[in-house]
Image (tube, rainbow, N blue to C red):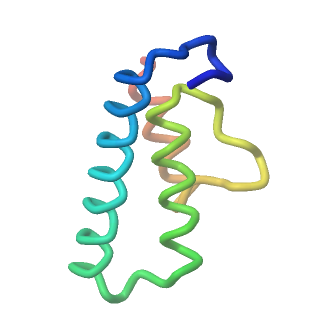
Amino acid sequence: MRLVGDDDPLDASALTAVWMSAVDALITWWLDHPGVTPTQMTERCHRLIIAISGAALPAELPAEGGVRRQAERSSLRA
């Protein structure tokens, strides 16, 4: 939190609770989807963290099904 100029210990505590809940939810989701490989799950988590943060997806980590998803994004803009 200090990296973004927030030294409030309650904000840090709340963010820790949010993070732990998110990690727990992702592990539970993965256990419910045993066909997802560790590499796929790593890439999925990376995409989800980027989506939550609002950052741009780096070119070296394309979205799964990138062509289809790019077409979906284009149709959403129309």
- Give the vertical position of 51 relative to 28 (above or below): above
Residue farthest toward the front in the current orientation of the protein? 9
Q: Is residue 23 left or right of residue 4?
A: left
Residue farthest toward the top in the current orientation of the protein? 5
Q: Is residue 63 left or right of residue 29?
A: right
2 or 64, nearer to the observer = 2
Quadrant where the image shows the C terminus: top left
Q: Is residue 71 left or right of residue 2?
A: left
| Residue 57 figure quarter | top right
Q: How many marks?
A: 0
x, y (%) of residue 56? 65, 31
x, y (%) of residue 53? 51, 30
4 or 59, nearer to the observer = 4
x, y (%) of residue 46? 56, 53
Quadrant where the image shows the N terminus: top right
x, y (%) of residue 24? 28, 62
Seen at 55% across and 39% down, the residue is: 50
67 or 33, nearer to the observer = 33
Seen at 66% across and 54% down, the residue is: 62
Seen at 36% across and 58% down, the residue is: 23
- Give the vertical position of 36 relative to 6 (above or below): below
Seen at 78% across and 54% down, the residue is: 60
Residue farthest toward the right in the current orientation of the protein? 60
